[in-house]
Amino acid sequence: MTINNVDICCGLAWGDEAKGKIVSQLIKNNKYDWVCRWNGGSNAGHTIYIDNKKYATHIIPAGVFYGIQCYIGPDCYINFNAFKEEMEYLKSNGFDISKIYVSGDAHVITDEHIDNDNKHYKKQQGSTGSGIAPCARDKFARKGIQVIKCKFFPYNVWTDKQPPLYGDILCEGAQGFWLDINHGNYPFVTSSNTLPYSACSLGFPPILIRNIYGAAKVYDTRVGVDPYFEHKNSKIYKETFDSIAKIGEEYGTTTKRLRKVEWLNIDKLINAINISGTNIIIMSKIDILEKVNKYVYIHDDTYNCCDTKDIFIKNINDIILNKCKYIEQIIYSDNPITVDLFPSSFS
């Protein structure tokens, strides 16, 4: 069987851009044969609402909520205990876990990796302490342990070098553009490639990519350590940022840590859009700015304040459309559960 089309959802910021909501809506709107995860490990998280009930996954693709086959690719990192806990969580909530497959080439996170992470990476670089960085280090040092070598792994392991994928595929990314190991603010980055081209590591050629859905928010956030979120202007707007964090429930899905807030940096967003090849961008949480009644963005290192939401949206659209030639749609979302992925272009 052959692969027909591939859609990719990736983050354009520092993670936590509502990718889970977008992926969920894409699955509802399309008949995908597979939903895949290409990077990261249980250090990431997606929030999904099914029948208005909130669920959280960390490495298992959102296809499990809709009875669709799921594949966790060779560039992922597997913590056996965390994976088992997540599988049991899904099963206890009535979801079919028999269609979840893990690449035998994915690497295993050991207790030693987790201990090393907490000692050397968590405090200095804001790591989640999940053992990802030490596991990645051992992978590239050619001394890692692959899932296929672990006979105790009691779930579906795909051992063939030819991936099981066919038909129409949705790839969901973890983290975001500015956490990418190459493009992020090194060393305050994650240990994998977050850009959509990395999804090809699942086992398909880039020519099959149909749409790249880029997720962002109308303000910037991140968890962990990053000097960018510590500059003096953040202190000037501290009261507003605290309100945004509280009203927007800005807590990490995996760590539960409070996210740092900054105004949308449109120049960074443009860079992320162009390098990722995003053609459809979804800007979430416009409702949060409405509630604080503040509309600010950073452009050319200048803080630009808008009087109304409509002016804010128009300015953002004008800048993006002037700088990003691949964009076909800009969508603004004010709902944490669903998103309309087929509005009029640039509305």
Image (cartoon, rainbow, N blue to C red):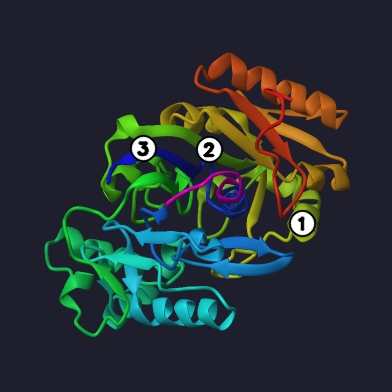
**Above or below: residue 92 compared with residue 336:** below
Q: Residues within 10 Å of mark 1 (few under 14, many from 20)?
A: some
Q: Is residue 210 above or below residue 116?
A: above
Q: Which mark's residue is nearer the viewer, 3 or 1?
A: 3
C-alpha span from label 3 to label 1? 46 Å
Q: Is residue 214 visible?
A: yes
* Residue under numbered circle 1: 242
Label 1 secondary element: helix
Residue type beneath disc 1: Asp
Q: Going by the picture, which residue comes out furthest to the front?
A: 1
Instruction: Tell whether 210 sits left or right of 198.
Output: right
Badge 2, how many Cα within 10 Å: few under 14, some, many 20+?
many
- Give the spatial CA distance, label 2 vs label 1: 29 Å
**Closer to the observer: label 3 or label 2?**
3
Is there CB contact under 8 Å for labels 3 and 1?
no
Q: Which residue is mark 3?
A: 4
Q: 200 and 269: which one is in front?
A: 200
Which x, y percent locates residue 117?
35, 72
Quadrant of res 60: bottom left
Identified by mark 2, the residue type is: Tyr
Could you tell me the amino acid type at mark 3?
Answer: Asn
Residue that carries the numbered disc 2 in the rendered image:
213
Q: Position of residue 122 (x, y in %)?
A: 43, 69
- Mark 3, other Cα within 10 Å: few <14 / some 14–19 / many ≥20: few
Report the magenta residues as a range: 26-33
Decide if residue 160 is on the left or right side of residue 294. left
